[in-house]
Image (cartoon, helix red, strand yellow):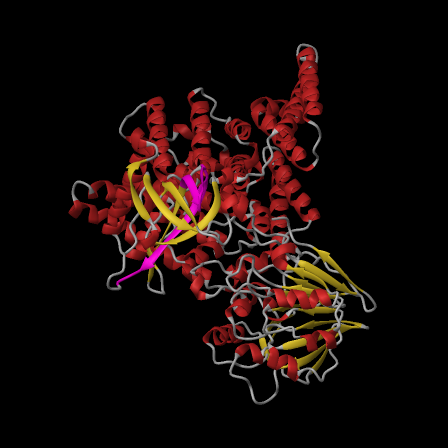
Amino acid sequence: MANAWRRHAVERQPLLWAASAFAAGLAAGEHFWRPPLWWLAGALAFTAAAVYFSGRRSWLAKGLALGALFAAGNLLIAARPGSGSSGGGILEFAGNEEVLITAHVIAEGELHAESTGEIRQTIDVETETVSRENLSKAITAGVRLSVYGPRGEPNARTPHLFLYGERLSFRVRPSAPRNFRNPGAFDYRSFLAEQGIIALASAKAESVELLPGFAGNRVEQWRTRARRSIEREIHSLWTSEQAALVDAMLLGEESFLGRPLRLDFQRTGAYHVLVVSGLKVGLLALASFWLLTRLRVRGGIAAAIALILIALYAGLSGAGAPVWRATLMLAVYLGARLLYRQRATMNAIGAAALVLLMINPGQLFGASFQLSFLCMLIIAGICLPLLERTTQPILRALRHVESVGYDVHLPPPMAEMRLDLRMIAERLERLTGFHLALKAIEAAGRVVVVCLDFALICVVLQAGLALPMACYFHRAMLAGIPANLIAVPLTELILGAATLAIGLGYFWFSLAKIPALAAAIAIQATSSAVRWLGALQIADRRVATPQTAAVLICSTALIVAMVAMRRRARLAAAGLAGVVASALWISLVPPSPTTRAGTLEVTSIDVGQGDSILLVLPKRETMLVDAGGMARWMHSELDIGEDVVSPYLWSRGISRLDIAVITHAHADHLGGMSAILANFRPRELWIGVDSPAEELQSVLRQAHKLGIRVVQHSAGDEIEIAGATVHILAPAREGHAWRANDDCLVMKVGFGTTSALLEGDAERATERRIAGAPLQSDLLKVAHHGSATSTQPELLAAVRPRFAVISVGARNVYGHPRWEVLDRLGASRVATYRTDLDGAVSFYLDGRNTSARVTGAAD
């Protein structure tokens, strides 16, 4: 019986097996490169053998065919061109010198008012010519351009809203996108390269000249104009916050959403409702197909019309690969249904995956592709069989409850349930009449079953997606089930009502306000629920990167569950229990951190122009000194603590910190600390001077709210902790300076005969004040990012370090590190490392010797 089931399963989903073999080949090729000729020979040999055995041993032929696809995947990876890109030569002009660029707009952006009073628009342009002095070159390359200008000032030029196809001329200093070079860091450069962006630049509005003519595609121009028209209609029908959510849900336009609201949706696992994704495609296809069938449109024609509508929506939204992936999968699935292959869902998923991977093999390694297909596999392989075993028999039994003859075609428990329902209807007959009571009971039963179906799907999906959510987003989706139970049904209502309102708005604005009001109520309910759930402590649980064993066990549990779900009930239950158990393991059991026992580790994390240092003490307790940050004038929503420091710590398997330290109240040191306290919940927060600066006071208020003990240290304190000794050298106990840098917390951390001096941003006054202390150290964290105000010759003579590290941002506007500081270090024969050149750097002090290792990821 089992063998027959296996043969039937393989025959039903050959394309899923084919896609799996091809994907395995791509993955193997990415990690174990071999010459293309090897894989070409292997693919041809497997193919020839499969053809030979096709009429003799079908099972062997199928295995050989899968081997051919595996070899083909390896071949595709081995033969692809190198990923390096010169950007058509535009990066030759990168540097501190301005160049004149002629370009045209290829992607529009919105005008946004900044808190500083500026108006800013970010657009993507394609260059035509790049000129510098007497050199001019015709270069075609993508540039992300930020145009900014003052708002409301007399005689000031308000930024023009640049539209697709418009030609521009502007002077800028282009630069290459730069990654933060830490293990676990987001590959921002590759992310932009996938969108065709090679360089970044910013220009004042007054320096951008609009040129005559049009450059681009007229179809794309029509699409962007239509999209902008819909956005105007949205903002005329709803308030600004409601319109921002409709923009995101319907068109994928997130630029109007503030980071706090986005964060609430992310924390609750409902962020997918804010983006144009496969979920939206499915909901719109379901609504379109249902409406067309109610209008008596035949199945094939209804499916074709629904596909056309979805394709138009995908093009209009401009959301890219995720939506087109979902559209292709929908087309394959509907095509299978038209060919009377209603149970070929897994096969349809395999067909779509195979086509997409052949077109673009690289997307296999992206989170979007993996999450899309894993979600579909969980629904088709676990959820649908589960519903067939549990709720679907009940749903079928709720059809035509008044028909006694239908009872004999149902299992005895279902027939008994129908009899009970008729008996209840007879009791209610005096109040409503028998038929009306029976219809009401039948409808109520259907609603309950549908709600139960949705709840089961949510639970299984959250459990099945626990592993990728932990790997890519470091979130335990404990709040995801209630959030999605509320958000997804309301999203379907919002999409339908908003679409109707926008359509009516073009013809009858007053009537459009009725569905707009319904959408507004649903929007308010969704955002309120998400904010409430996001405020709960369970929504803040973050998890470190799972270890290899956890990844293998969770993946195996999913595969076993998909196989077991169509077998005996006990096996199906065991498979489902394995998925839930593995999800709970990922969410609740922290992995073991990657540390060295009996060693003091000092790692300078690349946070750009700022400071963040991880100390791992000899007994494996962890201390984070500063958390980086960005100055307000940089107009960036990047949170260094959340987006840079936290991913590095999670990549090390660190889920909790023992101590966090703020050296002084400057944004480039404490700006990321709020996210660190929320994500890692240290037991203590150390500070030096309790400055009245609002940034510091905000962090202290958060620490008290989270129950984190705040400890103030000053010169003379000595702390024995986890096998190490921490000597506090500054600030002074009394007589604080008026400059925050001179009140900086300076620490000497020692283990055995080895030690490290961490100066923070200490300047001359502080260095003179601590000169009388025993400063000799193996490692010096150079003060103030290598500024000439620090690292005086007297200090170097007292410290006599073997190693030095400078935490500094690439191409920073301050000119750090200064040449005179580098000369002093060179003259003292100090081996100097820099985060702008080396990325993250780790130093290991074992009590007798000190060694250095560059751990930063390649840029």
Q: Residue furthest right?
A: 848
Q: Quadrant of residue 212?
A: top left
Residue 208 lies, in percent from the top left, at 34, 50
The N terminus, quarter of image: top right
Q: Is residue 789 left or right of residue 399?
A: right
Q: Residue furthest bottom?
A: 734
Name the residue rendered at 70%, 62% in the picture: 832
Q: Is residue 159 left or right of residue 30?
A: left
Residue 421 lies, in percent from the top left, at 39, 41
Name the residue rendered at 49%, 42% in the picture: 90
Residue 638 lies, in percent from the top left, at 48, 58
Q: Is residue 421 left or right of residue 357?
A: left
Q: Is residue 12 visible?
A: yes
Q: Using the image, determine if residue 219 lies above or below residue 498.
A: above
In this picture, which residue range is highlighted in magenta?
Answer: 126-152
Q: Residue furthest front?
A: 134
For the stretch drawn in magenta, the main secondary structure is strand
Q: Is residue 141 magenta?
A: yes
Q: Using the image, determine if residue 584 lies above or below residue 372.
A: below
Q: Using the image, determine if residue 839 lies above or below residue 300.
A: below
Considering depth in this image, is 803 or 715 the residue closer to the camera? Answer: 803
